[in-house]
Image (cartoon, rainbow, N blue to C red):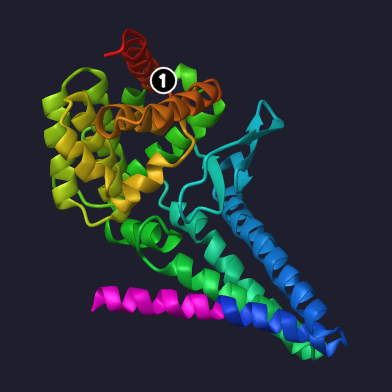
Amino acid sequence: MKKIGIYLVYVLAFAFIMLAFACGTIAFAELGYSAVLAFTFGYAFALLSMYVIFILHELGHAFCGYLTGYRLVAFGLGNFLLVKKSGKFYLSRTAVLKNVGAQYIGLKEDENDQRIILMLSGGLLVHLSLMLLAVLFGFLTKSWYFAGTWIFLNLSFFLNNVLPVDITDGAKIVELIRHPENVTYAYVMLRHSAQTLLAPQEYDLKDFIMPIAEDVRGSFAESIQIFQGLVFIFDGQIETAKKHFQFLLDKTDNPMSQTLSQLYLLQIALLERDHEKAEEYASNRGVKSFLSLKMADTQIMQAWYQFLVKKDRDQTDKAIKIARKNMVTSRLVRDEKRYYENWLAELEKELAEGV
């Protein structure tokens, strides 16, 4: 029943998006434009509105973060990030994860402050405020189709974000309400995200791990457990890492934790030259999505997969080229970068020797 409810919310959110585009088209048709121009302008208006709302959503996080003592580190839309270093802003590019259109990253000194929930609620509060403003605009101007575009867009985004699944704001808020002790892990993850932008080569992944009981639930704690599994791999403790990720995969109900566990189980299968297991994990839809990201670590994994399992030299070379290009500007911390550079060099050596 829970899954059915979630799918119904997704269907409703999609319907609101369609209604928003329809309202945009009708709004311009009422201004006297031809059908073609009304559709074109209406579509463009709705699309532009979506990007403006994405930005306002993240500004909501930033504003609520400012109210509760956060220091702005980065603000991004799509592939572009504005990173604040030493009081100045720098533009950089980043890979885009599925369902992440924009992002805000902040740092806070007090890592026990429960008001992180207010910062996480900032985007949702923006959507509610924009809906109220759109209704007010409709009453004042009688331009209900223009108002409707913003009402339906914000309704859609609100539903998608408030739904407590995967990595949504709603999921994070519900987790911290149910497990207030997880706030410590949430701040560690924020600190990791910030440092990968500010000074990745001054930190190791092991700097962001801490003791966590096996029965602890929640995406923040599980993210740190994923870091621990990676450190096991970096230290050559492959069997320990395999048991660690398999345990996490078996216990979690979080889709992102499940995908990342299978992604690193794929990496372990490649290290062990277990082609059957590698194929099993690589066929997972979430893992496929990660392997398509143009990030250095995932492309190195992709290269090994194409080389060992698929025996596709062209795809192997393509992945190596992308990995080499993105390694220079990667957000990998020091021990991560060292490990993946060595793993890539090992593959290039095997290719050169014709293994």
Is residue 21 one of those drawn in magenta?
no
The residue beneath circle 1 is 337
Is residue 15 one of those drawn in magenta?
yes
Amino acid type at mark 1: Lys
Residue 54 on image: x %, y %: 62, 59
Q: The C terminus appears in which quarter of the rendering?
A: top left
Our reading of the magenta stretch's main secondary structure is helix
Residue 84 on image: x %, y %: 65, 33
Front position in the image: 238 or 192: 238
Residue 206 on image: x %, y %: 31, 24
Front position in the image: 107 or 222: 222
- Tag 1, which secondary structure? helix
Q: Which residues are magenta?
A: 1-16
Q: Counting other residues with Cα less than 10 Å from the Cα at mark 1, is it few (<14), some (14-19), or many (20 or more)? A: many
Residue at position x 40%, y 16% in the image: 341
Hey, which quadrant is residue 319 in on the image? Answer: top left
Residue at position x 23%, y 79% in the image: 1
Q: Is residue 290 above or below residue 179?
A: above
Q: Is residue 338 above or below residue 289?
A: above
Residue 244 on image: x %, y %: 15, 36
Q: Is residue 193 above or below residue 172?
A: above
